[in-house]
Amino acid sequence: MARKITVIPGDGIGPEIMSATLRVLDALDVGLEYEYASAGLVALEETGELLPPETMASIERNRILLKGPLTTPVGKGFRSINVTLRKAFDLYANVRPVVSMPGTRSHFGDIDIITVRENTQGAYLAADAQISEDGQRAESKMVVTREGCSRITHYAYELARRAGRKKVTIVHKANILKHVSGMFLDVAREVAKEYPDIETEEMIVDATCMKLVLNPWQFDVIVTTNLFGDIISDLCAGLVGGLGLAPGANIGETSAMFEAVHGSAPDIAGQKIANPMALMLASAQMLTHMGMEAQARRLRDAIREALREGDTERLTPDVGGHGTTDSLAGAVIDHLD
Ligand SMILES: NC(=O)c1ccc[n+]([C@@H]2O[C@H](COP(=O)([O-])OP(=O)(O)OC[C@H]3O[C@@H](n4cnc5c(N)ncnc54)[C@H](O)[C@@H]3O)[C@@H](O)[C@H]2O)c1
């Protein structure tokens, strides 16, 4: 029986890269059925809401969301749609793998790092955020809980075990943020004891950034809090040539959302030259999450082979070709076998 997932094509290049990605998933024959839902600017124009209740109901029903990039209107008092979705479905683990791919512009090769970032607590939740009446003072609270620190660290170690990884690096700033980062480090150390088969190291966030640039091969799985994780995962994407091939999963106890890390790229929307590979890699994460690891590997290998082959007629301009979103999907499909 087909497994139904919710699909939000998204704004800008979203519908183009989503249709290419679904073409590849169909060719993989993984037995998925798609329930389309809208969000972002498209939904705002159609329904007056960025995240209509029908879309939320569809995610609630299907529990798996494949999402194209969404545009959050700037300066109109709209809350980020991504933040809203993470909060509504308690998607606490943001998992961002970066892997070197052939034919991409990057300063390093052979990189394979997974960043696991806490998604629902800390600086970005901006608890009690306010600006004083005279506009001279801004403040917001950073809150973490032992439970929140524990579940993200457990998630990272379980992922490391499942994926056969060797080491988890706990990234913190407990020397300065003694309470908030201190609690994270404290709990992470306790959790680490449950996984003696996996090497644990602790690293302060600023030193981590330097070491990532000097010797990125020493890293395997990184686990950290919200703000540090956001910055570090982009740094890691930079190590393999930028956001173009960076997927991201947002995982909760009951629901999960998979997306490309890049945005809706309004500058090239409608030109049919957007690279769908990041969304395809996100859908490979989705297949792994759904227990279809063999198909996920087939998809990742096909993407890698399409890049290795380097057929400039079929690859999109960002990876050195002059093809289209559709021709690139065709190249990936041809390499599925
Ligand atoms: N996950 C999301 O939904 C998400 C993430 C980031 C930004 N956004 C939104 O996207 C909009 C545009 O943001 P931005 O311009 O800062 O970032 P962006 O990632 O959309 O674009 C940055 C640059 O990268 C290029 N690019 C991005 N994806 C590409 C792809 N798949 N293939 C080829 N080139 C690609 C763009 O053409 C642009 O030059 C904003 O409204 C922002 O809020 C959404």
Image: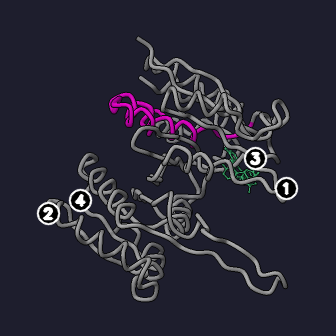
* Three-letter code for the amino acid on which mark 2 is drawn: Pro
Residue beneath label 1, please? 76
Query: Is 84 placed left or right of 108 in the picture?
Result: right
**Disc 3 target residue:** 71
Earlier-in-chain disc, 2 versus 3: 3
> Which numbered dot is residue 196?
2
Along the line of sight, which residue is nearer the eye, 322 or 210? Answer: 210
Q: Earlier in the sequence, mark 1 or mark 2?
A: 1
Q: Residue at x 50, y 63 (%)?
A: 121
Label 1 vs 4, first from the N-terminus: 1
Spatial CA span between label 3 and label 4 = 38 Å
Query: Which segment did they paint magenta?
Result: 273-302
Magenta stretch: includes residue 239: no
| Between 311 and 199, the one nearer to me in the picture | 199
Q: Position of residue 8 (x, y in %)?
A: 65, 32
Q: CA distance from mark 1 to mark 4?
A: 46 Å
Rendered image quadrant of residue 58: top right
Upstream in the sequence, badge 4 or badge 2?
Answer: 4
**Local SS, label 3:** loop
Neighbour tally class for label 3: few under 14, some 14-19, many 20 plus, Cα within 10 Å? many
| Quadrant in the picture for the N terminus | top left
Foreground mark, 3 or 1, reads 1
- Which residue is denoted by mark 4 in the rendering? 166
